[in-house]
Image (tube, rainbow, N blue to C red):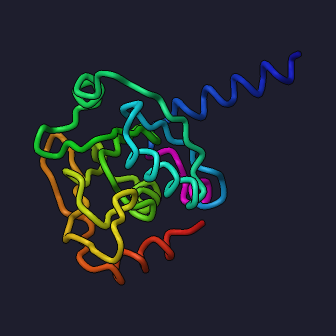
Amino acid sequence: MKIRFGLLLLWIVAISLPSSAVSNDEVSSEPLSITVYKSPTCGCCKQWIAHLQEHGFNVLAVDSDDMTAVKAQYGVPDKLRSCHTARIGGYTIEGHVPAKDIIAMLENAPTADGLSVPGMPVGSPGMEVGDRVDAYDVIQFSADGQEVVASYGDAEEVRDSTEQGSR
């Protein structure tokens, strides 16, 4: 019983640490747990979750009938919104962000609120339609502003990025 309580206490402390307290070794060697808030009927959200799982993430999917409230709760700017919102390591992930960009953010631990792929660009993870890939950016956002941290634009580039992001 004491061991279980100790492990529970250790887990609670670990998940409450700020994202900057996560070392590069922890990011690369431990499965990453992420919570994804999504509409119960959204198919592309399920496909994005599968993309994350393929790249070593443990996903807790939470259905919500009020995604606008979820986005507001986690401070997602209106212009950066998409269909689903996720939380990992104190960061917010909005939309179809490639797994490799989430991993890079966790490894670099920037002072930021999170990452977004605004809208639902065809060819982004979870939005695959044949070989078509619309150009899209991954945007890091915070109260201080926004910055493009990755850009994608053709099927080969996106395919390579998802293969390189495998864990």
The answer to which image quadrant residue 70 occupies is: top left
Q: Which residue is most to the top?
A: 1
Judge whether residue 15 is colored magenta: no
What residue is rendered at 41% in x and 75% in y? 161
What residue is rendered at 41% in x and 38% in y? 87
> In the image, 57: left or right of 48?
right
**Vertical relation: 117 (above or below) 160:** above
Q: Identify the image quadrant of the C terminus.
A: bottom right
**Vertical relation: 130 (above or below) 113:** below
Q: Where is residue 111 drawn, in percent x and y?
A: 30, 48
Comparing 27 with 17, the one in front is 27
Q: Where is residue 143 drawn, in percent x and y?
A: 16, 39
Magenta: main secondary structure: helix
**Vertical relation: 83 (above or below) 136:** above
Q: Identify the image quadrant of the N terminus.
A: top right
**Vertical relation: 58 (above or below) 125:** above
Comparing 47 with 19, the one in front is 47
The answer to which image quadrant residue 126 occupies is: bottom left
What residue is rendered at 17% in x and 46% in y? 80
Q: What is the number of callouts on the image?
A: 0
Q: Where is residue 50 drawn, in percent x and y?
A: 52, 53
Q: Which residue is most to the bottom?
A: 156
> In the image, 12: left or right of 165?
right
Q: Where is residue 94 drawn, in percent x and y?
A: 30, 45
Which segment is the magenta one?
20-27
